[in-house]
Image (spheres, rainbow, N blue to C red):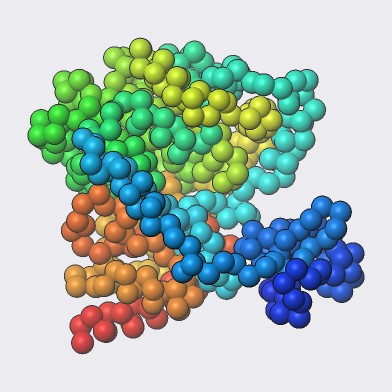
Amino acid sequence: MQERSSVADLVRSLKGDLNRYSPGEKLPSSRALVERHRVSPVTVSRALAQLAAEGLVVTRPGAGAFRAQPRTDPASVDTSWQEVALSADATAEVVPRAVDASGVLVTLAAPPPGVVEFNGGYLHPSLQPERAMAAALARAGRRPGAWGRPPTDGLPELRDWFARGIGPGFTAAEVLVTAGGQSALTTALRALAPPGSPVLVESPTYPGMLAIARAAGLRPVPVPAEPAHGVRPDLLAEAFRATGARIFVTQPLFQNPTGAVLAPDRRGEVLGIARAAGAFVVEDDFARRLVHADAGPLPATLAADDPDGVVVHVCSLTKATSPSLRVGALAARGPVLERLRAIHVVDNFFVPRPLQEAALELVGAPAWNRHLRSVAAELKTRRDTMTAALRLRLPELALPHVPAGGHHLWLRLPDGTDETALVAAALRAGVAVAPGRPYFSAEPPAGHIRLSFAGVAGAAEITEGVRRLRTACDETLSRGTG
């Protein structure tokens, strides 16, 4: 934590000093910067790397760092030809494969310093098993062959570990190791539907999945889901009949963003409806290891209840560990597995072996279960803190469902609220929130925001963030009713 803040401080200081140097002029040496700013060589190296990434300095091995030449004026560059090249799909018999990453970037972009991060999609560093991961990576690096080429499907022991987590009857032979859940979803959608075809999605749903579908030229078709009970089977059946779709993507456990758990009586219905339609169900089981301490026994995966190969299962270690431990799994039965395997290999070759070995070391260590218990307790505390603060300070924001897993709450705004204006006002007040619009594949029924309680430092920061959000709501709601 201290190292990260030191890097940010040094970057700000160096930016202030850059005007002292002419373009191309050499900056002080790393040793001089260490002595002047009283920081470590690692901090200097990282700060210079960040400035280089922003195009402000140029680093030359053995020579040092230099102020970068001014960038070419964008107005003098003619890229108009790209409009034609990138719109080629528009004239083809497919859906244009435009990529809108805005809904994903909301949860990936770090807010400015001092802003409470309610828009995050990952555990705060204080919740991550950093010591256990460091120890696992060190042990993995010493394993014989750890830096060699792994099997394209993944290490057999890791595939077996994922298979046992999916449910009885699954074997390592039915599992592919992927570079996280996003990569697995990308492979699944590309494998199961040709460009131009519809894909049924829960409404609302995870923006990253919508982005994947549209980038593949698929047409997301929304199927309404209830905040506490999940997708409505009657509307799912109707959507299959109306569209002829062959895929339904669902998050049946602690759905993002509603937190819903698919009701027990709907699980069999969903599988039966898909089977009757000759369709696949892509099960994104992203939150199983983000259960809260008061959740009780979890339902089995949909894949565990599926004897006919209807379900293509996706899961990952990333959400419960670190955004940089991008190790997940894709599981399926029947001929579809070969197609999934082929696309996975073409896109990725394989997941780096050191990362797979580190994942194996982590989940096999005694610290793993301790970590999961600790996260479960802390997420419950944070959820309760945020829920209580919202009910006290922001009762006008409807909270239809308090989940027993996951890392966020889904709030409906009062009718007539300008969602975009509220999100902007919140950032001015010092709190970043995720707007609801990117979670809908069609026009949303109302304005929403999603608040994450996992990406902040603790309960005090949650309380302060809700206080700041109150300020933003006072500004926005009064303007909307004035």
- Left or right: 449 in relation to 293: left
Image vertical order of residue 252 relative to residue 419, above or below: above
Quadrant in which the C terminus is drawn: bottom left
Q: Nearer the viewer, residue 394 or 428?
A: 428
Q: Residue at x 54, y 61 (%)?
A: 110
Of residues 297 and 263, the one nearer the viewer is 263
Expressed as whole percent of the image width and height from the top left, the position of residue 206 reads 35, 47
Query: Residue at position x 44%, y 24% from top?
Result: 343
Q: How many marks?
A: 0
Q: Measured from the top left, where is residue 158 in percent x and y?
A: 59, 23
Query: Residue 151, image x and y in percent?
Result: 60, 17
User: Quadrant of the image for the N terminus?
Assistant: bottom right
347 to 51, vertically: above or below = above
- Residue lying furthest bottom in this view? 482
The x, y position of residue 10, in whole percent, is 74, 70
Q: Quadrant of residue 473?
A: bottom left
For image coordinates 64% across by 63% down, the residue present is 55
Residue 165 visible (yes or no): no
Q: Quadrant of residue 342?
A: top left
**In this view of the protein, can residue 442 be seen by the observer?**
yes
Question: Residue at left 31%, top 26%?
Answer: 192
Depicted 3 relative to depicted 307: above or below: below
